[in-house]
Amino acid sequence: MHIVVAGLNYRTAPVSIREKFTFADGDLEVALSELKETKSIMECVIVGTCNRTELYVVVDREHLCGHYLRGFIEKWFGVPREEFNKHLYIYENEKAIEHLFRVTSGLDSMVIGETQILGQIRDAFLLAQQCKTTGILFNTLFKQSVTLAKRAHTETGIGENPVSVSYAAVELGKRIFGSYDHKKVMIIGAGKMSELTVKHLYANGADKVIVVNRTLSRAQELAGKFEGVAGSMDKLLVYLEEVDIVISSTGSADIVLTKEQVAAVLQKRRSRPLFMIDIAVPRDLDSAIGELPNVFLYDIDNLQSIVNNHLQERRKAALVIEDMIVDEMAAFDQWTRTLGVRPLIQALQTKASSIHEETMDSLLKKLPDLDERELKVIRKLTKSIVNQMLRDPVNRIKEMAAERHGDEALEYFTKIFALEEQLAEQERTEQAARQQELSETHERWKDELLTKVSMKPADALAKT
């Protein structure tokens, strides 16, 4: 099996492309299910943030994985592969593992060392576990990645400097206005990014902050933390007349402010400059707004240059984390080398247990007068002899499997202990279990389809 990641991020694709490949929260479970059912894919995790969309998969055929992954992306998002091929990266095996470690540790983020991505990777993994799309490889790899990231942040302090996309947005505003004294700021959206932005604004002297959100109660909750003003979306254009700065970060799939709406408001502002930062993906603000006079519009990609000015200390810490990643990759590689040992050890234990039981049966026939206590003592002692005889061979094959010619060692081990029959039986059992799971999945799909057809015949048939 092979580990592969395919995706696009802020380095390979501009926001105008990335916003076409975002997963809605409610769609992730369905997407994971469909990805898992894609040919050749054994395990999968989907990571979707404002700066990246990535598919992590375990595949049984490495040379065809790119074709199948492109097919899934093309079908799910409805975008021909010709439009995203040049933006898509695909890493395999060691490079894929290294990429995951770097992403989780914050080394591949727009803001190097940011900690938010750690929680996003953890949540993506937990959802995949819940949807039963992970197995032994990803259960180990993602847990190791999260543990590494936590240790990296603790030991290096890479996240201590207040550098984030929201912080960079506030810094950009300071370049335009000099300071936030006597400036009015409107935040569109009341999520975590908006809350971080409000914190930075108040720390830099903002005079008044207005929080506008589709859910008024959420806006009130956020505004209340900072003695700000809360408003609903229907008052957006009214507030736009009085504010100096607009920072937008909603989860909307549609444009929140159009060029025409802003142009109408500008007539009432008497040429006062309007500074607008769009840190949402997909974008909230119509890109054509930047063409209007006295309006300065920036999106999330424009923040990169500001972020770079605050990263010197984080870059030093990143060098330390790079070394930690090398060690973790070596540890994971050694663990994967021992995976082949598990079936062998299980087969050896099964064979030893069978021999032990046969010997005990023979003993009972030859010594039928043994009482229960005597049988218990004999069983315990003979079992101990078997376990002691197996201990050294088991430990030695674990060591040999992690060495350069581990595959040959496993083959010799199989022949020496004549484990071919036990291994074949294990494979038949596992194959039967996989077939049973597949049959149950098909039955579940059939029941769901019949339910849809009975409730909404036209819609259900159209989807099929």
Image: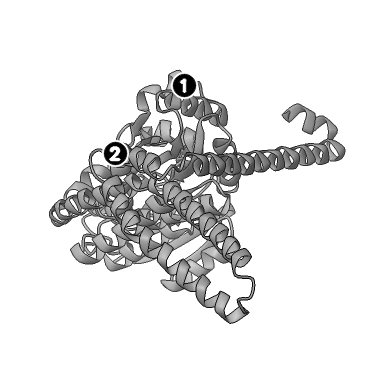
Q: Residue furthest bottom?
A: 373
Question: Is residue 99 found left or right of 155 in the rendered image?
Answer: right
Look at the numbered disc 1 and give the secondary structure of its residue. helix
The residue labelled by disc 1 is: 81
Instruction: Answer above or below: position of 208 versus 455.
Output: below
- Residue 279 horizontal/vertical position (percent): 39, 47
- Say which of 128 and 335 sits in front: 335
Residue 43 x, y percent position in the rendering: 49, 42
> Which residue is located at x 57 percent, y 49 percent?
132
Give the residue number, with chain letter if any, for mark 2: 94
- The quadrant of the rendering that contains the N terminus is top left
In the image, which is nearer the foreground, mark 1 or mark 2? Answer: 2
Q: Label 1 vs label 2: CA separation? A: 26 Å
Sort mark 1 into few (<14), some (14-19) or many (20+) by Cα contacts within 10 Å.
Answer: some
- On the picture, is 14 further left or further right than 189? left
**Total numbered circles:** 2
The residue depicted at 28 percent of the width and 53 percent of the height is 396
Quadrant in which the C terminus is drawn: top right
Q: Earlier in the sequence, mark 1 or mark 2?
A: 1
- Tell which residue pokes out farthest to the right in this image: 454
Residue 357, position as x, y percentages in the image: 56, 60
Query: Closest to the observer: 228 or 120?
Result: 120
User: Disc 2 marks which amino acid?
Assistant: Glu
Indicate whether 2 appears above or below 71: below
What amino acid type is highlighted by mark number 1?
A: Arg
Residue 4 in view in this figure? yes
Instruction: Please tell me the numbered disc located at residue 382.
Output: none
Q: Is residue 256 visible?
A: no
Is 42 or 392 nearer to us in this picture?
392
Q: Would you identify the image quadrant in which residue 320 lies?
A: bottom left
Q: Residue at x 40, y 53 (%)?
A: 140
Residue 219: x and y in percent read: 52, 63
